[in-house]
Image (cartoon, rainbow, N blue to C red):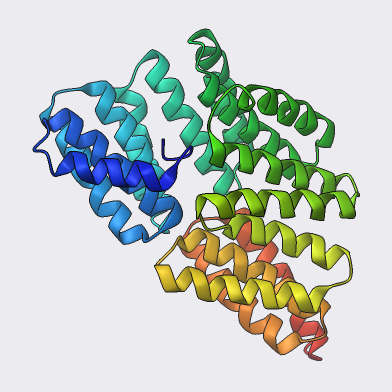
Amino acid sequence: MVFAAPGEALTRAEELLGADPSPLHASVAHQVIGIWQRDFGDTRRALAHLRRARDLAARADSAEREADVLATLGVALVHAGRTRAGLEAFERGVARGSGHTRARVLFRRAYVWWVLGRHGEALEDVRRAIPVLRQAEDVIWTARALTLRATVHLALGSVERADADFTAAEALWDTTGQEHDKADAVESRGLAAFRSGDVPAALRLLDEAEERYGKLGTPTFMLTIRRCEVLMAAGLATEALAEADGAVAALDGIGGQSTRKAELLLVAARAARLAGEPQTALARAAVAVRLFAGQRRTWYETHARLVLIEARVATGRG
């Protein structure tokens, strides 16, 4: 329910914890709250709930439950900038889970590899996960895995492969009530349209996705990053800089994901350089480089270093 009706999921999880549940059910409730906080709120609160969920799963003596929680915890740790601890949680999760559960763990590790810019590892894990999810007739997680694979293909420049996966995923989403995931699918199609060179279609799809997120009351930091890219391509760098800076302030205000902050700072640096504000670009890029380095995100760090160099050249420091 967290990605179908986020607010209702959070309320029901909190109500369940107030009803003295068993360790197994309490683990689920804490995990739900942890997911909500991780993706829509405060990462520190997310980590506290997810560690509690992990401990309760161990008390319930359920290896599958523990594996599932470890995967959620691994994603949260990486988004908090604690990459080594996050990958260690995934190692334990893959070892503890089996079959269908392990496939879900592998999908989430593939997502983390994508966040880290390690695209080969992402494709390998999602390749292992998809057949098992399909065999289990797990429509929601198969659609998520196809969406992720498409996103990785886009990062590698394979637009046609991405389009095929996005189309297959959207057909599956249409059979579900996963409203947040559906909004994400529209956002992804916007990104694909942009990569294909259709800026008007990209902006229209991103606006549609934002409207869908608005109905759910969930933040849209990834969408902001993508829209800033489109705005820059349309020659609207000043608008992109203002949007990125506003999103950084909003993210800081809720204690949100460190990984998203670094990405927003990178896009702000690029926008500032294009808008003829090299000193602003220098400042944003320098912080982005430090954050990416601390997060062990070498692929992103390299992109940020390039912007930093370009900004230095623009200030006469050739």
Figure quadrant of residue 308: bottom right
> In the rendered image of this protein, does residue 144 appear above or below residue 302?
above
Tally of marks: 0
Task: In this rendered view, identify the residue nearer to me: 229 or 184.
Answer: 184
> If the image is split into quadrants, where does the C terminus sit?
bottom right
Task: In this rendered view, identify the residue nearer to me: 198 or 63.
Answer: 198
- Seen as rendered, the residue at the extreme top is 135
**Is 92 positioned to the left or the right of 127 in the image?**
left
> If the image is split into quadrants, where does the N terminus sit?
top left
Q: Can the viewer see residue 100 in this picture?
A: yes
> In the rendered image of this protein, does residue 217 appear above or below residue 309?
above
**Is 243 positioned to the left or the right of 142 in the image?**
right
Task: In this rendered view, identify the residue nearer to me: 190 or 63.
Answer: 190
Residue 272: % across, % down:
75, 79
Residue 251: % across, % down:
49, 68
Q: Please report the residue visible at 26 percent of the width from the left and 26 percent of the height from the top.
A: 65
Residue 224: % across, % down:
65, 61
**Is 11 positioned to the left or the right of 218 in the image?**
left
Residue 142: % across, % down:
56, 22
Q: Please report the residue visible at 82 percent of the width from the left and 76 percent of the height from the top.
A: 274
Q: Can the viewer see residue 88 in this picture?
A: no
Figure quadrant of residue 284: bottom right
Q: Please report the residue visible at 63 percent of the width from the left and 22 percent of the height from the top.
A: 172
Q: Please report the residue visible at 40 percent of the width from the left and 21 percent of the height from the top.
A: 102
